Structures are given as structure tokens and as C-alpha cells.
Image (spheres, rainbow, N blue to C red):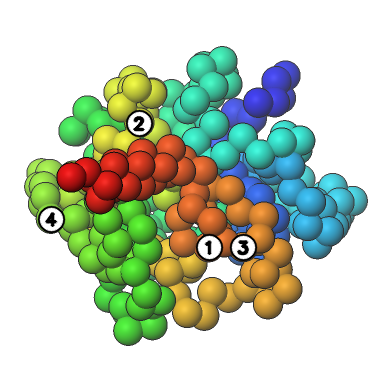
Amino acid sequence: MAAGTDIAAAGQMPVLIPAFNNPTYVAGMVGQLLRFPGLRPVVLDNGSTYPPALALYRRWAAQGLAPGRVLVLLLGQNLGPRAVWQDAGFLRRLPRHFCLTDPDLELNPALPADFPAQLARVAAQFRSGKAGFALSLADRHLMVDTAFRHAEGWKRIWESEAAHWQERLTMPGFAEPLYRAEIDTIFALYDQEHFDPAQPFRGIRVGGRFTARHLPWYRETGLPPEEEAFYRRAAEYSYYMGDRPARQLRPLFAWQDAMAGAAAGAP
């Protein structure tokens, strides 16, 4: 990961955005974050080769997009969206509280202006390393309805995601619904006092006004056709938009297939 860069600007909370050949989503996320004065979007580009993505970064550099607020780090290779917590040295350079998000989310228009502080309260209350946004399943009629392969088998999006809406929690003085649920790289605030890189998915999801939409789940992804086609061909870590399984799942799938083959061949 990049070294020697002042990611934690004074008075601003960094929001790390892993990016790879998806300029439409990256520009959309940065634009949404700039509505909140206390946030600093930090784009971590994982070696994008799609020309419009590189043109976007050059344009931002030339025009000085939101001077002092938006930072683009060109990593030169595809380290994947989890590299932030997999690189212990990089993680140590971050402040106690920071945010990480995939770029392909549509934030709730009713999201409170002080949402980072509220997420920090949730993380502290439950001694959780992550407190983040729940993902809406309300408009499943608009979602891709084919099944995707997961660790536990083939499931449609809302079937696999329903588990994240099951374990309800309560917190004194906090009105939004809370759920104990795994969080990968969807939008979350990290509290390094409680975050354990060895158990990186433990978290609390916040619903209500914090609920976001995960755009790749929908038949209409919001991407130009050429960009979507390029991304699908090049994607390495995407669960839903790659032409091949996500890299992090390939060893498990290979093992499952080998076991199934052995069982089928057994007398």
C-alpha cells in the first residue's frame, strides 16, 4: 500500500474507497461524500486500466477537485478491497476512526449529517470494530433474480442477504434499528480500539435512515454498457459483477468441487 501520504487530514475523517475500473461508481461515491464537510474521500485505485477511469483521475488532479479533501492514491496493482486491513503497516497509519466503503453504493438521502459520530457511538456501545450501513432489500423486484454461488451454496441476492437482518439489537437513546451482522467492504466506520484484523467481518449494521442501496444487485446497474462490460471482464474480487468467481472464493469453490467429485466417484 502507499506510504508517506497524509491520509488523515486535520479535522477530516478519511473515507477509503477501493476502486478498480469503475469510474462511474467512484465519481458517484465521491460526490455523495462531499455533501458531508467532515469527510475526506480517499480513492485507492487498484491498478485500473480502463481509460475513462484514468481520465477521471487526471481531470480531478488538473481541476483540483475539492482542494484538500479528495485524495487519489494509485496503487499500481490490484490488491483487492480488503487490503486496508490486510496490510498491518497501512492500518497503523490510519486514525482510530476511519471509514471504508465500496464505491457502488447509493447512500440514503435521509442520512443524518452527523452519521459518522453516530456510527462511532454504536461501535463504542457494542465494542465493535465496525459499524456500518444496512443494505436495502425493499425493492427486490428490481434486483437480478438469478442465483449466485456463495460459500453455503447457490442463492439469490435477497436469500443470502436476509441473514444480515435477523439479530436485532437495541441501544439506549438510539432510534434507528441495529443488527449484529457481518460487514465486508460495504460502508462502515472502523474503530481501531475494537477492530481485530483476524476477525475482520464482525460488525453492527444500522438500518432506517442509514440503509443504503447496493447498485450491482439491480438489473439496471447505472453503468454505461461499455464500462460494465469492461469491468465484468477484468473484475477479480466482485461477488456479483465478475465474469468469474471472486478471487477470495475460488479456493473454497475448488475444494467444494473436488469433494463433490470425490463423493460422486466413491463406490
> Toward the viewer: 50 or 66?
50
* Picture layout, residue 57 above or below residue 28: above
Instruction: Look at discs 3 and 2 and give the one toward the viewer.
Output: 3
The residue singled out by tag 4 in the image is: 166
| 130 sits left or right of 124 in the view | right
* Label 4 neighbour load within 10 Å: few <14, some 14-19, many 20+: few
User: Disc 3 and disc 2: Cα gap in Å?
Assistant: 26 Å
Residue 12 in the image, given as x and y percentages of width and height:
56, 36
**Which of pointers 4 and 3 lies earlier in the amino acid sequence?**
4
Residue 82 in the image, given as x and y percentages of width and height:
50, 36
**Which of pointers 3 and 1 lies earlier in the amino acid sequence?**
3
The residue singled out by tag 3 in the image is: 232
Identify the residue shown where x is 68% and y is 76%.
224
User: Disc 3 and disc 1: Cα gap in Å?
Assistant: 6 Å
User: Disc 1 and disc 2: Cα gap in Å?
Assistant: 23 Å
Q: Three-letter amino acid code at disc 4?
A: Gln
Which quadrant would the C terminus be assigned to in this image?
A: top left
Residues at circles 3 and 1 in contact by the CB criterion of under 8 Å? yes
* Picture layout, residue 141 above or below residue 214: below
Identify the residue shown where x is 54% and y is 56%.
244
The residue singled out by tag 2 in the image is: 200
**Which of pointers 3 and 2 lies earlier in the amino acid sequence?**
2
| 111 sits left or right of 105 in the view | left
Residue 74 in the image, given as x and y percentages of width and height:
75, 38
User: Disc 2 and disc 4: Cα gap in Å?
Assistant: 20 Å
Residue 253 visible somewhere in the drawing: yes
> Toward the viewer: 222 or 11?
222
Q: Three-letter amino acid code at disc 3?
A: Arg
